Amino acid sequence: MSNDLAKASDAALSVAVARWHPEALSEVYRRNAGPVYGLAKRLLGDQALAEEVTQEVFVGFWERPERYDPARGSLRAFLLAVAHGRAVDMLRSEASRRAREQRAQAVVVDGYDLEQEVVELIANERVRQALDKLPEAERTAIELAYFGGHSYRDVARAQNQPEGTVKSRIRSGLRRMGDELSHLAQGTNR
């Protein structure tokens, strides 16, 4: 069968992968792993991250081969587009993480300001109260994304949920928290 796969078209390989033939995925990988890895490495500039993106692309294709539409282009073009998207997501996630770290380092103050510390403690307590009032799914997604420093994709993977669902939960939870913080700041407790 492997000789047949070596001559198979992109569409035929996609159908074979959809039928859970690991040899077909091996052939897809053999044909396309180099260009996928090369693109990820060029965009990310990091071998380990490029390997991670490459693995995610092929695992994603194994799990959802129906996303590839032969009428829209070659399998290589599809896999490269997926790799590009994942690499850009990773770059954004890394940039966001670095910005958070830089902001945290910039907060270092020379002198000790008791009043500022009290204000921050109160604000932290109010945020915790608002967070505790959220449904568990929203609270967990927000904690992972904002306190854990994870990307939406990582949160989705951790919660075994689609990325769109996680984004909606975070948006909804942040909206609820904003309303609750507004009430807490006004001294009204709901």
Image (spheres, helix red, strand yellow):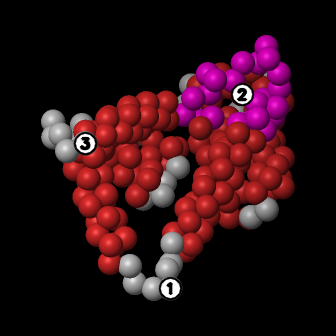
Please name the residue shown 15% across and 40% down the image. 189
In this image, 162 relative to 48: left or right?
Answer: left
User: Which element type, helix, strand or loop, lies under badge 1?
Assistant: loop
Residue at mark 2 to residue at mark 1: CA–CA distance: 63 Å
Q: Residue at x 69, y 53 (%)?
A: 91
Of 45 and 190, the residue lying toward us:
190
Q: Quadrant of the N terminus?
A: top right
Along the viewing direction, whichever of 61 and 142 lies nearer the viewer: 142
- Badge 3 element: loop
Q: Label 2, on which residue? A: 13
The residue drawn where x is 50% and y is 85% is 110
The quadrant of the rendering that contains the C terminus is top left
**Earlier residue among tags 2 and 1:** 2
| Residue depicted at x 59% and y 42% | 59
Q: Give the extent of the magenta segment.
A: 61-82
Specify few, some or many for label 1: CA neighbours under 10 Å numbering under 14, 14-19, or 20 or more: few
Which mark identifies residue 110? 1
Q: Which residue, given by chain and number where applicable, does mark 3 sit on?
A: 186
The location of residue 29, given as percent across then percent down, is 73, 44
* Above or below, comparing residue 133 to residue 13 in the picture: below
Query: Which amino acid, by three-letter code, is at mark 1?
Result: Asp
Q: How far across and down, in percent of the image, does residue 33 sit?
A: 77, 47
- Marks 2,3: beta carbons within 8 A: no
| Label annotation for residue 78 | none
- Find the distance from the CA under tag 1 to the CA under tag 3: 32 Å
